[in-house]
Amino acid sequence: MNEMTDSNSISSDGQIDDRNTTSIDAIKNRIAAINSLPLEEHSEEYEAVHASLQRALSEIDGI
């Protein structure tokens, strides 16, 4: 079973898997930037962020 710490995954053998760190950080940056977009683009950007989050979650071992 994996533990999560700071967007990194630590496997049962103690190896750190940071493959998702960059993508999670990019998603967080996209969320933070939504307020700077024109209002009519918010919905589309939220949908894109949601799709990115789903992809990131599907890449977690065991899911």
Image: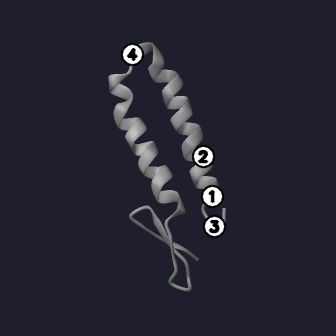
The x, y position of residue 56, in whole percent, is 57, 52
How packed is label 4: few (under 14 Cα within 10 Å), some, or many (20 or more)? few
How packed is label 1: few (under 14 Cα within 10 Å), some, or many (20 or more)? few
Q: How is the image coloured?
A: one colour
Disc number placed over residue 38 in the picture, else none? 4
| Secondary structure state at the residue bearing disc 4 | loop
Please identify the residue farthest to the bottom as the structure is shown. 13
Disc number placed over residue 59 in the picture, else none? 1
In 3D space, how far apart are the residues under numbered discs 2 and 3 (Cα atoms)?
14 Å
Mark closer to the chain start, 1 or 2: 2
Q: Amino acid at mark 3?
A: Asp
Q: Using residue 55 as the reference point, say whether residue 19 is left or right of it.
A: left
Q: Amino acid at mark 2?
A: Gln
The reply to whether discs 2 and 3 touch (Cβ–Cβ < 8 Å) is: no
Give the residue displayed 38% in from the left and 41% down from the top.
Answer: 29
Q: Which quadrant holds residue 38?
A: top left
Q: Amino acid at mark 1?
A: Glu
Judging depth in this view, the residue of 48 and 26 nearest the camera is: 26
Q: Which residue is mark 2?
A: 54
Mark closer to the chain start, 4 or 3: 4
Mark closer to the chain start, 2 or 3: 2
Quadrant of the image containing the N terminus: bottom right
Mark closer to the chain start, 4 or 1: 4
The x, y position of residue 43, in whole percent, is 50, 22
Disc number placed over residue 3 in the picture, else none? none
